[in-house]
Amino acid sequence: MRSEKSRSRRNFLKLGGSTALGLAAVSSLSCQPEKSQTENGQSLQQLNPIRKFPDNFIWGTATAAYQVEGAVNEDGRGVSIWDTYSKIPGKILNNDNGDIACDMYHRYKEDVLLMKSIHAGAYRFSISWPRVFPNGTGTANPKGLDFYNNLIDELLANGITTYATLYHWDLPQVLQDKYGGWQSKETSKAFADYAAYITEKISDRVKHYFTLNEFYSFTDLSYERGELAPGLKLDQKSVAQVRHNAVLAHGMAVQAMRQTTQSPIEIGVAENIVTAVPVIETPENIEAAKKATRELNAGLLTVMMEGKYTEHYLKGLGVNAPDFTDAELKLIGSPLDFVGINVYLANKYVLAATNADGYELLSHAKNHPTMASPWHMVSPESMYWAPRFVKDLWGTNKIYITENGCGATDTLSDDGKILDTDRVMFLKNYLAQLHRATSEGIPVKGYFHWSLMDNFEWIFGYGIRFGLFYTDYKTLARTPKLSAEYFKTIAKNNILV
Ligand code: GBH
């Protein structure tokens, strides 16, 4: 423990030694860089008043339980489908798994200080369902909850607002074995019970909740394409049912949480919205892209916002449409307090068309640039159009960007720095579009960077890094990257730089 600490401190010193990179990663070293930052901050505000974000805009970071916690066999945690899946040879790059990950389970106090050092005012973390309910349902494991209680207390003591995600893909294995996971409404019910339990226990301190994260990933990619846990390749009808059971879980949870909360809370979703972007911003193309965005999300975000499936969606599925009732649709459309969207890219570019749909979807050109993840098309405009269409389509008055960031194979320079100019470039461009949105009055209230630190990147294992902090997976030391300094400058001054 002690040697870990001094190791990370040494790394910090290397980076912090230069005034330009004066990051206060460790509180005891914070005095000097803080001062120059404040002066710097004032001049920034004077120079660029027009670049300010709205007052009280929230700058936070995000992680997910299986990707950072490690400690998979501790304190009574049950097995999740990701424990199982990551152990199947060949599924994960280098056969990596989340057994240790960033070991945040033991290092959360240090990590809260990292957040503080970059002026992150909020933290979006996920709760591991099998830590709290090792068997998915039934008797809770108090030690599992203790970890989150401690984390929450530590965050609040450091002035960091807590945003809890209840499901970030780590389904209890028991529910997969017993019910086929999301193939059954039993899993939806179990999720609602688990969610109700969590709000009952932590709503005295946690006021913001996201039900489930990125439906498409844990439905289609997991049950149809077999790319993510549990790695199934089911038929269309079964997958449509999986999607339906997932949004049903969301709706049931919203209702259940409102019943058990101890005090007023805000509930939303954290969805990887499929974003259609007008390739040329004419009124016709904008209208077409808005229409396309509604249809491209029909089975997930759209039904959660509207409480009904679009005709286009049901027609497209035909006999493969899911089984559902009106009462279920009503639950699925339960009113939310905000909408969270993960924004990484423009999934499609759009032109207006005279066909029946009214739009034409363009795929990315062959040489469209990507970041290190092969799926990650560089498309900063998505950061404007995604929240704009959420507002225009559904009249949402509170939106959070629950994730944005990019992967890289960051390497350390000889003197121990991580000068991730690629990530800084990425952020500058995306945040400029976010600023465009807020300055037009699109009600984005906060931004959570994915991720606080490098972590287990699902099938890419530890091979692709998304952090503002570099994780040394041998020593588990965390070192701020150049992008951490960039984030800090923005978060501290609430201004686009
Ligand atoms: C998020 O997914 C996740 O919430 C987070 O856990 C993850 O670490 C982070 O982003 C970075 O990946 O079939 O070609 O589309 C981002 C959106 C959607 C990206 C599914 C990967 C699969 C590849 N993800 N996509 S593809």
Image: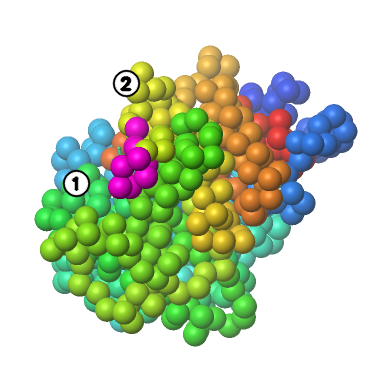
| Residue 366: numbered disc | 2
In-front residue for pair 368/77: 368
Residue at (31% x, 42% y) in the render: 355
Is residue 324 depicted above or below 439 in this figure?
Answer: below
Crowding at mark 2 (Cα within 10 Å: few <14, some 14-19, many 20+): few
In the rendered structure, the answer to whether residue 161 lies left or right of residue 129 reads: right
Is residue 227 depicted above or below 23 in this figure?
Answer: below
Queried on whether the Cβ of the residue with tag 1 lies below 8 angstroms from ligand 1, the answer reads yes
Residue 350 visible to an observer of this rendering: no
In-front residue for pair 280/61: 280
In-front residue for pair 105/241: 241
Q: How many marks?
A: 2
Residue 262 in the image: state x and y as whole percent. 58, 83
Tell which residue pokes out farthest to the bottom in this image.
Answer: 259
Residue 268 visible to an observer of this rendering: yes
Residue 278 in the image: state x and y as whole percent. 47, 36
Stretch of the chain drawn in magenta: 354-362
Earlier sequence position, callout 2 versus callout 1: 1
Residue 473 in the image: state x and y as whole percent. 41, 35
> Does 30 appear in magenta?
no
Q: Which residue is mark 1?
A: 225
| Residue 200: numbered disc | none
Crowding at mark 1 (Cα within 10 Å: few <14, some 14-19, many 20+): some
Residue at (57% x, 61% y) in the render: 396
